[in-house]
Amino acid sequence: MENKYYLGVALPAYMFGRWETFGPVVTENFNSYTCENEMKPEAILVKPEAGGEPSMDFKRSMPAVQRAIEEGVKMRLHTLVWHSQTPRWFFTKDYSDEGELVDRETMLGRMEWYIKGVLGHFCGEYPGLFYAVDVVNEAFDVGDGDENGVRKKNSLWYETIGPDFIYMAFKYARMYAPEYLKLFYNDYSCMYKDDLILQHLSDAKRDGLIDGIGMQSHLSVGEDLDKFFSAARKFLDAGYELQMTELDVGIKEVNDETLAKQGEYYRRLREFADGLAENGENFTSLTVWGVNDATSWRRRESPLLFDAEMKEKPAYRGFMRK
């Protein structure tokens, strides 16, 4: 596939065991893989026995890694520091689910240990396979945040370290990442909080700790794409590398009209991405978050390029600009 940026897809581990079903479509259309869940902290961290220390186990991500190597495609690493899908025991003094939370310095040590270990494994064992990593995921939300909009609700990173956990995560990632690996901040609804994101990443940007912003791009038919495009341009103008990392477009009711509108959304999004790349903008990757509607986390909204029977939808034809 010839393109000026990576065209990617998110894949759960079980799809690699059913490659005869999903592989032909994946191989024909995409040159970048993202693990849907298998590289998140809860999939890697191993809870210690009483009195012991935690360890890491990467076997859940191995089907994706091995297939990527076999197919000659690259990968995005998703994600290192996230308030969700990170076990509570990792934040407690005795590594128990009900234990007392540790202090700031202890948690900073654990953060560094985790980031060093994950990057050391994936980039040390498979040099050059990964081109980007989501260092911090979904850290800003006015509704669930502190007075400055930093996510506070249900965030044990915030509770143990404080709002600068974001900066510290990028600091450690820069320390242990190889030069070729781009460090990203990744978030949803970026079109509604672009200024907030830029404000809070400015220190990391100033100190050379961050490379890019990932716009998750979980959209729905009816949303204002011009507002989405405006936010994307704002991030580029601020000097960030830009990627669309988790694209899907939901519809409320499936019929010929809504499917056609969904196809138009996908066409416009791909046209926008192509235009950025063709104009020499620093846009480097577009990832669709799943293969078909039946396996999507938004399956009730039929958000992807293929239907439950793996038949092409107008979304596919729009996205591939056919």
Image: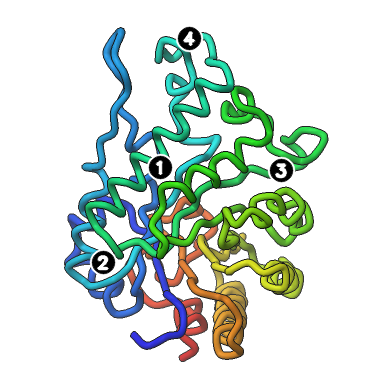
Q: Measuring from the top left, give residue 32's x and y in whole percent.
A: 36, 69
Which residue matches tag 3? 141
Q: Secondary structure at mark 1?
A: loop
The answer to which of marks 2 and 1 sits earlier in the sequence is 2
Counting labels gives 4
The answer to which of marks 1 and 4 sits earlier in the sequence is 1
Q: Secondary structure at mark 4?
A: loop
Q: In this rendered view, identify the residue nearer to me: 140 or 305.
A: 140
Q: Is residue 313 above or below residue 147?
A: below
At x 55%, y 67%, the residue is 244
Left or right, residue 128 beside residue 181: left
Crowd rating for badge 1 (residues with CA inside 10 Å; few <14, some 14–19, many 20+): many
At x 72%, y 68%, the residue is 238
The answer to which of marks 4 and 2 sits earlier in the sequence is 2
At x 38%, y 46%, the residue is 37
* Amino acid tagged 4: Gly
Q: Are marks 4 and 2 in contact (CB under 8 Å)?
A: no
Q: Measuring from the top left, give residue 236's x and y in whole percent.
A: 67, 72
Which residue matches tag 4? 99
Label placed on residue 22: 2
Q: In this rendered view, identify the residue nearer to me: 29 or 45.
A: 45
Q: Are marks 1 and 4 in contact (CB under 8 Å)?
A: no
Which residue matches tag 1? 40
**Quarter holding the N terminus?**
bottom left
Q: CA distance from mark 1 to mark 4?
A: 22 Å
Q: CA distance from mark 2 to mark 1?
A: 23 Å
